[in-house]
Amino acid sequence: VLTDDIYYRLVYGDAAFESVAAVAPELDGRWVMINGVSKTYAMTGWRVGWLVSTPAVTKAAANLQSHLTSNVNNVSQRAALAGLTGPQDRVEAMREAFDWRRRMMVKTLDGLANVECPEPLGAFYAFPDLSWYAFKVGGDIALTNLLLDRAGVAVVPGEAFGAPGCARLSYALGDAQLEEGLERMAKALGELAG
Ligand SMILES: Cc1ncc(COP(=O)(O)O)c(C=O)c1O
């Protein structure tokens, strides 16, 4: 079992992260857990991640990786170490900031006519169902293009996730920007509704 635990520190409400090794001891080491610094320490772009598995798997992965990417540069390694071993209070502060943005975004989207937005329990994305609007303009790719052109808001079409009619919105940006983006999006959708 391969798990991508990159958002393990970004969970909300009653949700709790559990690693596959802890919840399924019967798997007896037949797991590969992937993690990294990108989300927890807002270090996207530093390109530092790792996997945890049995010695045989980690050795094979290291052999493969050494021929694919050579290594992780020293600066990134030092920066990742500073994140992992330094004070962790900023991680919780960021989680709380994301939690506020999450609730604000979901409330705003869910309050729009013909939109339903389930509450995400982890990561930093909302995934509203915009199919009423997508249907009007000929699909969710057309709708995301329209939002980009008319509102200047970039969202990822749900089709990319096997959920046509939906869209993925990131709330990993400043509160003011987020509020403005949502306002513009609401206006553009409102115009579509007529
Ligand atoms: C689910 C998931 N896993 C892993 C990553 C890895 O990020 P990076 O390539 O920056 O380490 C990302 C980042 O977008 C992600 O969303």
Image (cartoon, rainbow, N blue to C red):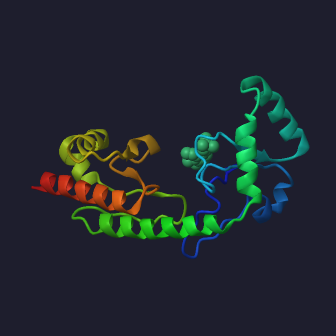
User: What residue is rendered at 83% in x and 29% in y?
Assistant: 63
Q: Residue furthest bottom?
A: 14
User: What residue is rendered at 38% in x and 69% in y?
Assistant: 104
Q: Is residue 174 visible?
A: yes
Q: Residue furthest top?
A: 67
User: What residue is rendered at 27% in x and 42% in y?
Assistant: 148
Q: Position of residue 126 (x, y in %)?
A: 42, 58
Q: Position of residue 65 (x, y in %)?
A: 76, 30
Q: Nearer the viewer, residue 66 or 87?
A: 87
Question: How many numbered marks appear?
Answer: 0
Quadrant in which the C terminus appears = bottom left
Q: Is residue 108 left or right of residue 33?
A: left
The quadrant holding residue 110 is bottom left
Question: Ligand 1 appears in which quadrant?
Answer: top right
Q: Residue furthest left?
A: 194
Q: Position of residue 16 (x, y in %)?
A: 64, 70
Q: Is residue 151 left or right of residue 45?
A: left
Q: Nearer the viewer, residue 6 or 47?
A: 47
Q: Nearer the viewer, residue 132 or 105?
A: 105
